[in-house]
Amino acid sequence: MEAFAAESGGMPQLNPEFWISQIFWLTITFGILYVVLSKLILPKISANLEIRKSQILENIEAAEKQREESELKLQEYEKIVKNSKNDSKNYFNHAREKVLKNINLKKEALDKELNAEIQKVEDEIQEFRDKAPEKINKIAVETSADLLQQLIGTEVNKSSISAIVDDLSRKKMDEYYGN
């Protein structure tokens, strides 16, 4: 009896006489909900999902294309950098060779000039060396003749003095040169 009292009291969904109308309205409500969802809302959601999917695929394709383009640009850049390095290295080597060639030419010219000057000085030294004994002998003869004239008071024969000076100078030269 208590169960019947609960049925009659307040919960009509537990009352079996209302079950048919409840099932009817439940079917109508869920049918309308199904039609609204399947015909209106789900197609819009599906369309949005398809649009998003196609947009994502387009973005992925564009990103892939841009990645490939950037890789090509990077390869071009690396090629340009490599060529620039090679060009600068070649230019540097060429400039270095040119400078070294100029230095060598100037060095050779300077060496020739120095050799010519050295030869000239050596020739002058040799000329002085060759003429020195003769001049020394002449000075010695004149000085000796003047000294003897002042000591003796009469003029002395220069050829005798010259023979004596020549003899002495030959002996000194032999000692000097080691003959």
Image (tube, rainbow, N blue to C red):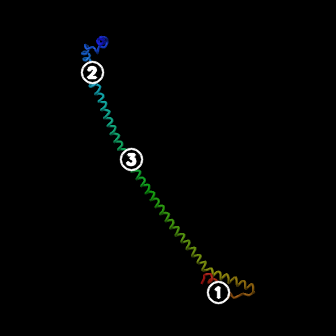
Instruction: Check the image and report above or below for 141 versus 62.
Output: below
**Callouts 2 and 1 close, C-beta under 8 Å:** no
| Lower position in the chain sequence, tag 1 or tag 3 | 3
Disc 1 versus disc 3: nearer the observer? 3
- Mark 3 lies on a secondary structure that is helix
As measured in the structure, the alpha-carbon distance from the residue carrying label 2 to the one carrying label 1 is 156 Å
What residue is pinned by disc 3? 74
Instruction: Check the image and report above or below for 57 versus 148.
Output: above
Q: Where does residue 162 sit, x and y in percent of width and height?
A: 66, 86
Disc 2 versus disc 1: nearer the observer? 2
Amino acid at the residue labelled 2: Phe
Q: Nearer the viewer, residue 135 or 87?
A: 87
What residue is pinned by disc 1? 167
Q: Where does residue 63 sit, x and y in percent of width and height?
A: 35, 40
Indicate which disc residue 49 carries.
none
Residue 87 appears left or right of 34: right
